[in-house]
Image (cartoon, grey):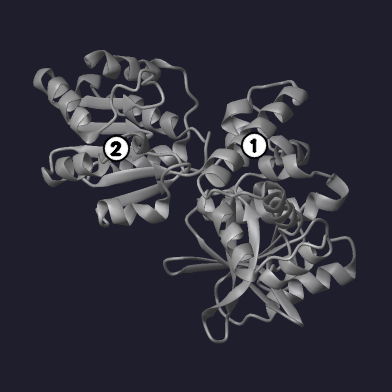
């Protein structure tokens, strides 16, 4: 049985690319005897972040009970009883300080084992899971709030530059927008192979995490909703708008069904909801949201045309960077005024306008004027793809969008 642990540990010797932001977060979260949940969509290197933590901290692997269920090819550990037996066998010869289990959802009644070890207050516990069988919203039921969560996002633009050893430039940023969110293909040079890999992974996520989990019978109908969302990532979307779109194809479906299907996309991290915010009343307005893709490579595999998409992709990029930096993000939209993003974190608040190019004085006045209508002392920023930075006599800042990560 111990061979299962040794096999899992072999992955720790693999060469990996470090992600310093997540390593910093891991260092802050792990050594407090809490249960750390590492989550997000498939193939974002959740396991590699754990490996990076172990290596960077020079942790003795004898102190680590590491089980990767993806590598348990014979599926020997099926229940919490078998897991407990394996742990006790390993712990007899090693003083375990870290319990790390990848894809824990494949073990029946796994929560009993984790709760038991947590109650002993002796171990640092780290687990990951797949959305095909377990959702983040269900964790509180299993662990009754005994955990902290670390969401792992796809590669940021600066991470892409670091791994590829490239300089920050507009050209490299545009290339990144098309392909480079997924760590698995970061060193692939053949564009056709990249597209093929992305398509297959998208189909796998949709089929396993959504269609099978929720027992969706009408796959073509579900695809139409996915298509609609992909084309409207910069528009405020209501259930009525989706309903009207489906009616054009003579498809009749209830608003509750549409709402459920969009929620399935959210539950599996395919898209994220950005709600509308009323600044005057300081409350969220329900059913008035924008939806952004967690990974643009999935969105672009559904449809991609630079001329029609660039401003949509830029908004999606800014939203994802803000989300990955732990901001809570809202939109503000009225007939006469629109603010693309209001980003809040603790006592910090930032306002963002995102535009492709400031191509005329009219565009300049519109984007800067919107932010000038907000009379508070928080930072207000315009982001665009212009090669030069614009400044006026107000407190509004302008930055090149490919420098956003430096701004934050």
Q: Nearer the viewer, residue 224 or 330?
A: 224
Q: Look at mark 1 in the image and give the residue it sits on.
A: 203
Q: Which mark is residue 74?
A: none
- Residue 92 x %, y %: 9, 21
The mark nearer the N terminus, 2 or 1, is 2
Q: Look at mark 2 in the image and give the residue it sits on.
A: 108
- Residue 126 x %, y %: 30, 38
Residue at left offset 67%, top offset 22%:
188
Mark 2 secondary-structure assignment: loop
- Residue 311 x %, y %: 78, 55
Cα–Cα gap, marks 2 and 1 = 27 Å
Mark 2–mark 1 contact, CB under 8 Å?
no
Mark 1 secondary-structure assignment: helix
Residue at left offset 24%, top offset 33%:
99
Residue at left offset 64%, top offset 55%:
292
Residue at left offset 68%, top offset 37%:
168
**129 displayed left or right of 300:** left
Q: Is residue 400 visible?
A: no
Q: Nearer the viewer, residue 11 or 359?
A: 11
Q: Nearer the viewer, mark 2 or mark 1?
A: 2
Q: Nearer the viewer, residue 93 or 3?
A: 3
């Amino acid at each position: 049985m111990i061979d299962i642990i040794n096999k899992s540990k072999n992955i720790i010797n693999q060469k990996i690319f470090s992600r310093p932001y997540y390593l910093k977060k891991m260092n802050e979260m792990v050594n407090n005897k809490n249960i750390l949940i590492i989550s997000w969509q498939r193939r974002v290197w959740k396991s590699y972040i754990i490996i990076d933590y172990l290596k960077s901290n020079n942790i003795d692997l004898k102190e680590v009970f590491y089980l990767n269920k993806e590598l348990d090819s014979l599926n020997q550990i099926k229940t919490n009883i078998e897991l407990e037996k394996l742990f006790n066998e390993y712990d007899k010869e090693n003083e375990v300080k870290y319990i790390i289990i990848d894809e824990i959802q494949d073990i029946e009644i796994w929560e009993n084992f984790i709760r038991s070890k947590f109650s002993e207050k002796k171990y640092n516990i780290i687990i990951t899971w797949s959305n095909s069988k377990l959702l983040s919203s269900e964790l509180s039921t299993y662990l009754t709030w005994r955990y902290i969560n670390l969401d792992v996002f796809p590669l940021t633009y600066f991470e892409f530059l670091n791994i590829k050893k490239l300089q920050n430039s507009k050209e490299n940023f545009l290339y990144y927008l098309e392909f480079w969110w997924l760590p698995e293909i970061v060193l692939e040079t053949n564009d056709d192979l990249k597209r093929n890999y992305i398509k297959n992974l998208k189909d796998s996520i949709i089929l396993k995490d959504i269609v099978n989990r929720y027992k969706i019978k009408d796959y073509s109908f579900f695809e139409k909703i996915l298509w609609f969302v992909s084309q409207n990532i910069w528009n405020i979307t209501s259930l009525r708008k989706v309903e009207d779109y489906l009616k054009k194809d003579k498809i009749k479906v209830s608003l509750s069904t549409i709402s459920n299907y969009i929620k399935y996309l959210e539950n599996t991290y395919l898209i994220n909801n950005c709600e509308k915010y009323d600044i005057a009343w300081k409350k969220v307005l329900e059913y008035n949201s924008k939806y952004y893709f967690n990974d643009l490579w999935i969105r672009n595999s559904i449809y991609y045309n630079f001329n029609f998409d660039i401003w949509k992709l830029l908004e999606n990029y800014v939203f994802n960077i803000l989300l990955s930096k732990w901001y809570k993000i809202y939109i503000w939209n009225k007939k006469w005024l629109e603010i693309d993003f209001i980003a809040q974190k603790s006592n910090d608040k930032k306002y963002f306008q995102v535009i492709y190019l400031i191509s005329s004085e009219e565009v300049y006045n519109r984007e800067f004027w919107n932010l000038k209508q907000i009379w508070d002392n928080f930072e207000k920023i315009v982001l665009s793809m212009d090669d030069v930075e614009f400044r006026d006599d107000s407190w509004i800042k302008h930055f090149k969008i490919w420098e956003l990560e430096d701004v934050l």
